[in-house]
Image (spheres, helix red, strand yellow):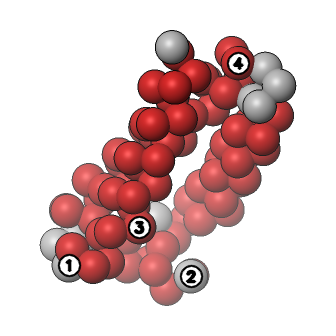
Amino acid sequence: MVSEYARWGYSNQRILLGCMQLLGGIGLLVGLTNSVLLSVASFLLTFMMITAVLVRIKIKDSLINMFPAVFYTCLNFIILYNSLI
């Protein structure tokens, strides 16, 4: 995983990004009992994953390598959408 962050150009922010992902996941879990937290966590994770897709486009990754980022973007957007209705 360390080499992937270097390939993406974010080796210096690896720990920060990992912590943000972990906090987002915890926010989703706690958000099961608090709809406002669920909306905020899913919005921030959706934004983070859109950025991940853009980074993968920038470095010209293949569609196969881009699939997980696109999948998690869609999944977080679905969670966000459902938390707002």
Q: Residues within 10 Å of mark 2 (few under 14, many from 20)?
A: few
Residue 26 lies in quadrant = top right
Tell me which label, 2 or 1, sits earlier in the chain. 2
In the rendered structure, the answer to whether residue 33 lies left or right of residue 1 reads right
Work out whether residue 48 can be spotted. Answer: no
Amino acid at pointer 1: Ser
**Residue 50 visible in this rendered orientation of the protein:** yes
Q: Position of residue 70 (x, y in %)?
A: 34, 57
Q: Nearer the viewer, residue 9 or 67?
A: 67
Where does label 3 land, which residue?
Answer: 68
Q: Residue at x 70, y 47 (%)?
A: 25
Q: Give the amino acid type for the residue marked by disc 2 in the picture.
A: Met
Q: Mark 1 or mark 4, which is nearer the start of the sequence?
A: 4
Say few, some or many: other residues with alpha carbon within 10 Å of mark 4 (under 14 / 14 to 19 / 20 or more): some
State the CA–CA distance, disc 3 to disc 4: 26 Å
Residue type marked 4: Ser
Label number found at residue 35 = 4
Residue located 27% across and 79% down the image: 64
